[in-house]
Image (tube, rainbow, N blue to C red):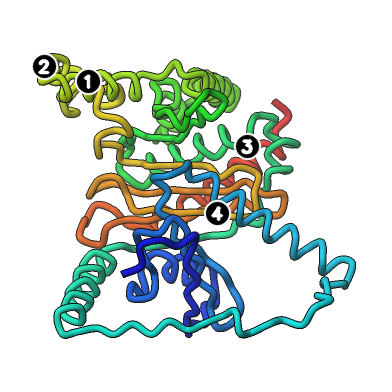
Amino acid sequence: MIEQALLVYALDDDNPENITEVACIGMLKNPQSRGFDRSNVYIVTQNGLIVANDEHSAYEGIIPTQIGDHIQNHIDSLEKINSWPILSDPYNKIIVREILFIYDSRVFDAINRAIKLFYHSADNIEIKAINVTQCTKEDIKQYVRIHPDTFFQLCLQLAYFKLHEHKPAPTYETASTRRFYRGRTETARTCTPEVVAWCRAMTNSNNQIPEIEKRKLFLIAANRHQEVMTEASENQGCDRHLFGLSMIANITGKPFELANDPSWIKRFKKKIYYFLNRFVFSGGGGNFILSTSCSGFTITVGGTSPMCLNGYGVFYRLGSDAVTFVVTAYRSCSDTNAQALADSIESTLIDMKTSFMKSNL
């Protein structure tokens, strides 16, 4: 119905009491007022909170995050000086005109079908958002002395490892390539053999591994994570390159022979190498158990649904006030539980930070 719009504002009657409820409003509620084909939909709740639903095919996902931070920082600056700008000219309400849409029965039927279809998918998604004030960006820098994103990723791997019977999870982390012309992202495959070795040491049932050895394995895993992120950010990853080759083959009608290679299609059986490193389409082709992204040292945190049916979405921010993360899972999968993983991540973050605070190693 609306062919062109810079953005959409939706005024909701909800009064969310926590960030989990805010996230649910942004992702899972009131589809009739959202306009999902618009890049920016800002949703304002009755108690004055704002959440956005973004379709960011036209630009990278960090853009709405930066917009949100800019708005919040501007509001904060006005609050500090206790001075909101006063317009010299009175606001002319005539320039705002309500548009009345006249629907026929076919449009009403289509809307109702779309609403049912939306809730059929939305009701299958579980969301849990947690604000961990006991672990902040500054804590990680002071006590752990590694990049906060690396610390979170390692804690995430350990949290999943403990929750899911000591199994590693193939993981997608977004690496930005915006330093390059028309660059967007590359896949950082962060579940490395080094991080698996550390997780096994941390969960060793015999408790025979010395703390100094665990710390050594942690630092090795941390260094490897930073190497993987650097390679991906410098356009040295494999996923976008292989995706480009597959698209060229598709356009030219030539067979993409790599698609039949065992390293491309083989699922995890006995060899962890294939589980962690199988080549799939851009973004993992829907095969990464953990789909993750860091919004940076921002005020804003995002979230999205899992990449695969037995997976999780884990998006997070690393703030000076707290580490905040949003976990999603599909209710139809009995193997996953967003609440359980969120609790495991929270306890792992706090335990690891405390361990470094008390350690003399």
Task: Compare marks 4 and 2 and give the one earlier in the sequence.
Answer: 2
Check the image and report above or below for 217 versus 330: above
- What residue would you read off at disc 3? 148
**Hey, what amino acid is under mark 2?**
Lys
* Disc 3 packing (10 Å; few <14; some 14–19; many ≥20): many
* Disc 2 packing (10 Å; few <14; some 14–19; many ≥20): few
Question: Which residue is drawn at the image coordinates 24% and 52% (left, top)?
Answer: 335
- What residue would you read off at disc 2? 254
Task: Compare marks 2 and 3 and give the one earlier in the sequence.
Answer: 3
Q: Residue 248 carries which label?
A: 1
* Disc 4 packing (10 Å; few <14; some 14–19; many ≥20): many
Q: Do the residues labelled 2 and 1 touch (CB within 8 Å)?
A: yes
Check the image and report above or below for 255 versus 316: above
- What residue would you read off at disc 4? 301
Q: Quadrant of residue 57?
A: top left
Quadrant of the image containing the N terminus: bottom left
Name the element at disc 3: helix
**Hey, what amino acid is under mark 3?**
Pro
Task: Compare marks 4 and 3 and give the one earlier in the sequence.
Answer: 3
> In the image, residue 338 lies at what x, y percent?
37, 57
Q: Quadrant of residue 261?
A: top left
In front: 62, or 222? 62
Question: Which residue is drawn at the image coordinates 71% and 81% (left, top)?
Answer: 91
